[in-house]
C-alpha cells in the first residue's frame, strides 16, 4: 500500500504530492498526520490518498516512519474543500490544511488536559493511626480527604505540599484516578435552557422555505430586529432532530458572547465556540468536542467554517455582507466559497442573513441563484428608528466647532434624563488620527509603514495601527523645530473624554481595539453597558451590528462620511450598510428609536436611501452603476500585490509582471476592461514596500484568470507576490 502525502512546508516548490510506502504492520488512514523522511530530515505530512501501486521505482520510494495520531484529522468532505480552494484561489495545499487543522491540533504541543482526583484508599482508611505523629501534613491531608473524597491533586499538593501527597501515594494511603477535563471557553455563559419562541407567519414561512431545500442557497433579507436569529435557531433545531449538526457564523468576536448566550440558552452544551480569541487549550478542546460529536453546533467567526462537524444539516452566515468573512492575509479566501462546498457535500441549506446584503449576493438572489426570503417588519411591530440628517457645514457656519451637533446634544440630554441608553459610532479609534506641525505641515509617520501615527492620550503615545509600533508624541517638529504641533481628527478616545465632561453623572463605555485586548473584554463591556441606565456606549464598527439592547433609544453617527469617499468602488455600498446597521441598534423594544446622522454632504443620494431604509432603491441605482462601469458582479477585479523589504526589487518585479499582463491583454483583447500598475496607496507596511497591478477582467473567462495566476506564480528571493480576486481592500 502506498500513500500520497503533502509535506508540512509552505513553499510553492514543495506544493506537490509525494508517494510513500505504508509500513507493513501499521494501519495508515486517509487524512492522517504522519512523520516521513524528507531529504536529510524527518518532517510532518498529511495523507491525501491511499493506493495499491506507485509509478515510482522501488529505490525511489521511502517509507512512512509512523502515524502521529491514531485518527484522521481531515474529514472526507474537506477533500472537496481542498479542491475548491485550490481551484478558486490557487492556494497551496498545505496552507489550506492549516486552515482546516488548527495549529493547536497539528503541532502536538497542546494536549488533552487530564485531572488527577485523589482519594483515600481502603488501606489508608484502616491504617491512618500508622502515620507518625510528627508527620502533621500527612495527617491533615488524610483528614481533608475524609471530608472531600475526590480532590484535585494540584489543589491538594498546593495545600499540603507536593512531597507530602507523593509520599502518601507511595505508601498506599492515597490513590488517584485520571479524568479528561475540557477547557470550556465562556464558562460564565451557561444560562438555563429556554423553550423555542413562537414564530410569526413570516418567520415560519422563512423556515419552511429554507428546510424545503428547493435551492440549497438562501438569502434571508430581513430588516434589523426582524427576528432572523430565531429563524436560524429553528433551522438548527430541525437539523438536530435529524441527528445532524450545524455551523453558525458571526462576523465579529464581539458578537460571539451574545450569540453563544442565545444558543446555549436553547441548546445547552451542544454548543462549542471557535474563534481566534480563545486560548490554545480552549481551541484544542472545543475542536475535539466538535470532532467527536460531543458538541453539535459550532458558533464562531470566519475560521469556524472549517469546524470538524460530520453530517451537517445547516450552515448559517449572519451579517453576510461583512468584510471580515473575506481573509485579507495569506491564505486568502472567501468564507462563502467554503460554505457552499460544504453545503453541496452534505446536501444541507446554506443561509446568508443580512439587512444590507452585498450587491453581489442580492444580484445572485435576483438571478435565481439563491432563494430570496424577505422579513420586512420588526418582530415587535415597531417602526424602524426615525433618522435625522444634520448638516455639519451649517453647524460650523453657526459657530459650532464641536464634533457634536446641537441636535445630537439635545437628543442625548433627553435620553439621559429619561434613563435610557445611547450608542455613538465613530469608526476611528485613538484620541486623534495624527499629529501635525502647523508651520511646515510635517505629519508624524511610522518608520516601518507609510501611514500616519495615531495619538493615544491615555498612554501618551503615538501608535501605528498597522504594525503596532509605538513612539513618543511630538513636542516640537523634527522637520522645522517649531513647537506648533496640532492634533488631527477626533477618535473614540477623545469622544469618551468629552462625553465624561458633558455628562459627568452618566457612565460612558468605549469599545474599540484598544479597550478589547483581553479575551473577556468584549463580553464584559457589553454586559456592563446592558445593566447600566442611563449609559453611553461609544465605539467603532464593533458596535455597528448584531447587538440587541432594549433600552437603546438613540444612536448617533458622528462622522458618517468616513467611508463615503474611500478609494474603493464599494464605498457607497459600505456606507449604506454601515449607516443602516448602526441605525438598527435603536428602538429594538417598546420605546421608539431615534438616529442622528452627522455629515458634511447631507444631499448625497446614499443618505437619502438610508433615511428611508430603502435597500431596494439603493440596490437598483448601484447595480445600474456597476453594470455601466463594468464593476463586479459584471466583472472580476484582480489585484497582484508585490512586497519586498527593499523598494527596487518590488518595483522591478511589478514592472516585469505588468509587461507580461500587457501581453496577456493582447491575447484576450475583449476580456480586459482595465489594466494598470502602481505603487500601493499604503506604499510601505511593516517594513515592506508595496506595489500592485490592478486588473478588471471578464467574470466568465476562467482560462484568463488561470493564466494571471500562472504568471504571478514566480519564485523570487527578494520579493513576494500575492493574487487577490475581488479584494475587500485595495489600500
Image (cartoon, rainbow, N blue to C red):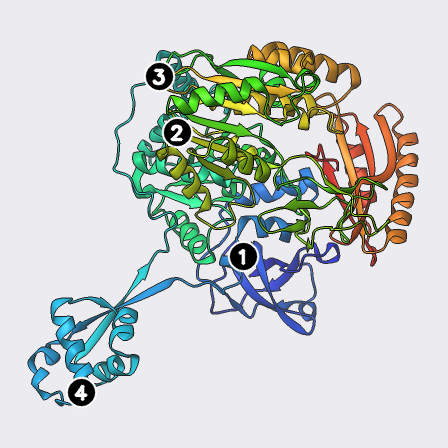
Mark 4: few, some, or many residues within 10 Å (few <14, many ≥20)?
few
Task: Give the residue pinned by disc 1.
Answer: 103
143 left or right of 499? left
First-in-chain label (1 vs 4): 1
Where is residue 293? Give x, y as percent: 36, 46
Look at discs 2 and 3 and give the one toward the viewer. 2
Task: Give the residue pinned by disc 4.
Answer: 135
Where is residue 155? Give x, y as percent: 27, 69
Residues marked 2 and 4 touching at CB (< 8 Å): no
Mark 2: few, some, or many residues within 10 Å (few <14, many ≥20)?
many
Where is residue 203? Give x, y as percent: 39, 17
Q: Quadrant of the C terminus?
A: top right
Residue that appears at 78% across and 14% down: 628
Q: Which mark is residue 590?
A: 3
First-in-chain label (2 vs 4): 4
Residue that appears at 42% across and 45% down: 273
Residues marked 2 and 1 touching at CB (< 8 Å): no
Q: Which secondary structure, mark 1?
A: helix
Residue that appears at 12% across and 89% down: 133
User: Can residue 60 be seen from the camera position used here?
Assistant: yes
Q: Give the Cα distance between marks 3 and 4.
A: 68 Å
Mark 3: few, some, or many residues within 10 Å (few <14, many ≥20)?
few
Amino acid at each position: 500500500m502506498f500513500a500520497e502525502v503533502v509535506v508540512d512546508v509552505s513553499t510553492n516548490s514543495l506544493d506537490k504530492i509525494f508517494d510513500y510506502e505504508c509500513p507493513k504492520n501499521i494501519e495508515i488512514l486517509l487524512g492522517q498526520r504522519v512523520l516521513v523522511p524528507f531529504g536529510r530530515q524527518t518532517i510532518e505530512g498529511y495523507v491525501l490518498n491511499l493506493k495499491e501501486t506507485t509509478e515510482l521505482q522501488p529505490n525511489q520510494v521511502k517509507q512512512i516512519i509512523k502515524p502521529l495520531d491514531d485518527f484522521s484529522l481531515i474529514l472526507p468532505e474537506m477533500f472537496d474543500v481542498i479542491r475548491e480552494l485550490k481551484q478558486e484561489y490557487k492556494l497551496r495545499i498545505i496552507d489550506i490544511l492549516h486552515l482546516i487543522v488548527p495549529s493547536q491540533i497539528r503541532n502536538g504541543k497542546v494536549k488533552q488536559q487530564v485531572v488527577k482526583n485523589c482519594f483515600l484508599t481502603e488501606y489508608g482508611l484502616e491504617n491512618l493511626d500508622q502515620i507518625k505523629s510528627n508527620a502533621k501534613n500527612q495527617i491533615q491531608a488524610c483528614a481533608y480527604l475524609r471530608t472531600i473524597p475526590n480532590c484535585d491533586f494540584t489543589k491538594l499538593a498546593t495545600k499540603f505540599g507536593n512531597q507530602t501527597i507523593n509520599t502518601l501515594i507511595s505508601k498506599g494511603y492515597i490513590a488517584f484516578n485520571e479524568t479528561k477535563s475540557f477547557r470550556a471557553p465562556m464558562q460564565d455563559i451557561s444560562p438555563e435552557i429556554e423553550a423555542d419562541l413562537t414564530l410569526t407567519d413570516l418567520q415560519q414561512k422563512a423556515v419552511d422555505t429554507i428546510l424545503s431545500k428547493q435551492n440549497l442557497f438562501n438569502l434571508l433579507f430581513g430588516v434589523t430586529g426582524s427576528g432572523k436569529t430565531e429563524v436560524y435557531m429553528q433551522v438548527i433545531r430541525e437539523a438536530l432532530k435529524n441527528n445532524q449538526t450545524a455551523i453558525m457564523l458571526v462576523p465579529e468576536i464581539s458578537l460571539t458572547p451574545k450569540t453563544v448566550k442565545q444558543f446555549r440558552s436553547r441548546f445547552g452544551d451542544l454548543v462549542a465556540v471557535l474563534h481566534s480569541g480563545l486560548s490554545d487549550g480552549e481551541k484544542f478542546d472545543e475542536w475535539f468536542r466538535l470532532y467527536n460529536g460531543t458538541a453539535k453546533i459550532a458558533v464562531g467567526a470566519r475560521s469556524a467554517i472549517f469546524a470538524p462537524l460530520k453530517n451537517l444539516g445547516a450552515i448559517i452566515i449572519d451579517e453576510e455582507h461583512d468584510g471580515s468573512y473575506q481573509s485579507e492575509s495569506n491564505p486568502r479566501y472567501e468564507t462563502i466559497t467554503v460554505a457552499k462546498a460544504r453545503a453541496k457535500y452534505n446536501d444541507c441549506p446554506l443561509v446568508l442573513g443580512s439587512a444590507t446584503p452585498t450587491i453581489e449576493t442580492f444580484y445572485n438572489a435576483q438571478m435565481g441563484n439563491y432563494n430570496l426570503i424577505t422579513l420586512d417588519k420588526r418582530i415587535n411591530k415597531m417602526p424602524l428608528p426615525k433618522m435625522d440628517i444634520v448638516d455639519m457645514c451649517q453647524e460650523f457656519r453657526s459657530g459650532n466647532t464641536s464634533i457634536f451637533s446641537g441636535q445630537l446634544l439635545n437628543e442625548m440630554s433627553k435620553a439621559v434624563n429619561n434613563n435610557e441608553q445611547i450608542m455613538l459610532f465613530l469608526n476611528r479609534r485613538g484620541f486623534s488620527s495624527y499629529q501635525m506641525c502647523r508651520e511646515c505641515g510635517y505629519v508624524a509617520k511610522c518608520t516601518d509603514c507609510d501611514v500616519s501615527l495615531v495619538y493615544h492620550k491615555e498612554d501618551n503615545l503615538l501608535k501605528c495601527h498597522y504594525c503596532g509600533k509605538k513612539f513618543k508624541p511630538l513636542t516640537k517638529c523634527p522637520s522645522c523645530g517649531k513647537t506648533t504641533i496640532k492634533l488631527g481628527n477626533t477618535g473614540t478616545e477623545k469622544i469618551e473624554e468629552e462625553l465624561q465632561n458633558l455628562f459627568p453623572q452618566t457612565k460612558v463605555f468605549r469599545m474599540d481595539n484598544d479597550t478589547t485586548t483581553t479575551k473577556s473584554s468584549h463580553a464584559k463591556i457589553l454586559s456592563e453597558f446592558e445593566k447600566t441606565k442611563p449609559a453611553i456606549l461609544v465605539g467603532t464598527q464593533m458596535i455597528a451590528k448584531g447587538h440587541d439592547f432594549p433600552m437603546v433609544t438613540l444612536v448617533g453617527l458622528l462622522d458618517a462620511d468616513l467611508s463615503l469617499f474611500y478609494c474603493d468602488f464599494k464605498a457607497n455600498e459600505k456606507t449604506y450598510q454601515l449607516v443602516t446597521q448602526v441605525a438598527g441598534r435603536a428602538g429594538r423594544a417598546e420605546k421608539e428609536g431615534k438616529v442622528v446622522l452627522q455629515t458634511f454632504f447631507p444631499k448625497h443620494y446614499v443618505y437619502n436611501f438610508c433615511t428611508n431604509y430603502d435597500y431596494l432603491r439603493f440596490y437598483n441605482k448601484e447595480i445600474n452603476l456597476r453594470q455601466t462601469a463594468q464593476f463586479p458582479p459584471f466583472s472580476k477585479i484582480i489585484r497582484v500585490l508585490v512586497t519586498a523589504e527593499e523598494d527596487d526589487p518590488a518595483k522591478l518585479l511589478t514592472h516585469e509582471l505588468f509587461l507580461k499582463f500587457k501581453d496577456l491583454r493582447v491575447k484576450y483583447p475583449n476580456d480586459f476592461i482595465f489594466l494598470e500598475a502602481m505603487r500601493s496607496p499604503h506604499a510601505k507596511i511593516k517594513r515592506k514596500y508595496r506595489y500592485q497591478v490592478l486588473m478588471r477582467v471578464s467574470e466568465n473567462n476562467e482560462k484568463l484568470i488561470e493564466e494571471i495566476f500562472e504568471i504571478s506564480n514566480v519564485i523570487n528571493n527578494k520579493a513576494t507576490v500575492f493574487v487577490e480576486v475581488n479584494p475587500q481592500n485595495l489600500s
